[in-house]
């Protein structure tokens, strides 16, 4: 099965693009959704998080306390790496399961940090689709969507790969500067046909 990795910086519009592919019946494996699932109440990562970070980072409902964890790892590289060491192996296991269960001719694997996490996902996908937009567009979208401060968004963007780095390794690029999907739907339709052809 053809596997297309979909990535892009925070606020670039990865979800809206993957949702558009889903309307064609394409199976979507979203590692962000998997991450949320395994850190929800009863999720597979909860015991590891409790063991490493303590019960203060678990809500009364039994989920990871996202706000507290975000505050901890914001300027703490070691804590961030420790959390990733818990989450990433579990995310990969779940993603592999979803890929094997996919029934469409090709599958879209949404991996926000595909370029940043090393060779694992580069080796797992056959093609890389990058959703790109100006940094200012990213900042405004994330402020509106998440309520983060401008400084918080800038720190996140600076911790990610640059636009140039992502574009340099991309097979396909979607420029997404608007807040509506309509302008790029024709390009998504063309990419869908290309991927169907490559999946034959």
Image: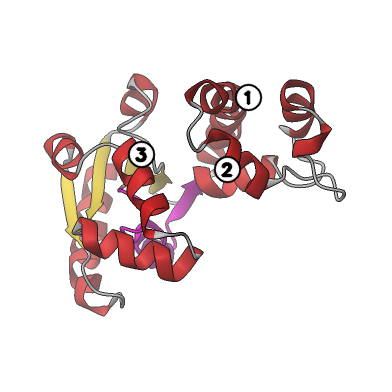
Q: Is residue 62 above or below residue 54?
A: below
Which residue does the image show at 83% across and 33% down from the upper left? 55
Residue positioned 84% across, 44% down in the render: 62
Image quarter where the C terminus lies is top left
Residue 199 located within the stretch drawn in magenta: no
Of the pair 101 and 170, the residue shown nearer to us = 170
Q: Can you tell which of label 2 and label 1 is closer to the viewer?
A: 2
Mark 3 nearby-residue class (10 Å; few <14, some 14–19, many ≥20): some
In three-dimensional space, the C-alpha distance between marks 2 and 1, rounded to whole angstroms, equals 15 Å
Q: Residue at x 17, y 48 (%)?
A: 172
- The residue indicated by pointer 2 is 70
Viewer-proximal residue among 179 and 103:
179
Image coordinates of residue 105 in percent, x first then y, are 38, 49
Q: Quadrant of residue 117?
A: top left
Up-down relation of residue 54 to residue 176 (above or below): above
Percent from the top left, x then y, of residue 87? 60, 30
Residue at 33% over, 30% down: 116
x and y percent of residue 192 in the render? 26, 59
Disc 2 secondary structure class:
helix
User: Which residue in the protein does label 1 denote?
Assistant: 86
Above-or-below relation of 168 to 22: above
- Residue found at the very far right of the displayed protein: 60
Question: Label 2 neighbourhood size at 10 Å, few (<14), some (14-19), many (20+)?
Answer: few
For label 1, the crowd category at 10 Å Cα-Cα, with few meaning under 14, some 14 to 19 and many 20 or more, is some
Q: Nearer the viewer, residue 90 or 97?
A: 90
Q: Compute the Cα span from label 2 to label 3.
A: 31 Å
From the viewer's perspective, is 69 left or right of 120? right
Q: Which mark is residue 3?
A: 3
Instruction: Give the number of the mark in front: 2 or 3.
Output: 2
The range drawn in magenta is 8-30
């Amino acid at each position: 099965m053809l596997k297309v990795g979909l990535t892009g910086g925070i606020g670039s519009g990865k979800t809206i693009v993957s949702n558009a592919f889903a309307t064609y019946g394409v199976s979507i494996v979203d590692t962000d959704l998997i991450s949320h699932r395994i850190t929800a109440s009863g999720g597979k990562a909860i015991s590891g998080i409790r063991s490493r970070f303590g019960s203060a980072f678990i809500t009364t409902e039994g989920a990871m306390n996202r706000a507290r964890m975000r505050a901890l790892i914001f300027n703490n590289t070691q804590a961030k790496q420790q959390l990733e060491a818990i989450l990433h192996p579990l995310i990969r296991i779940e993603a592999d399961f979803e890929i094997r269960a996919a029934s469409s001719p090709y599958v879209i694997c949404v991996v926000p940090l595909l370029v940043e996490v090393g060779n694992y996902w580069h080796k797992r996908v056959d093609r890389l689709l990058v959703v790109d937009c100006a940094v200012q567009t990213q900042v405004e979208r994330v402020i509106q969507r998440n309520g983060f401060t401008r400084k918080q968004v800038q720190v996140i963007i600076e911790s990610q790969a640059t636009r140039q780095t992502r574009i340099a390794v991309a097979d396909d690029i979607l420029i997404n500067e608007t807040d509506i999907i309509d302008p790029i739907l024709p390009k998504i339709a063309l990419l869908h046909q290309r991927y169907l052809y490559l999946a034959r």
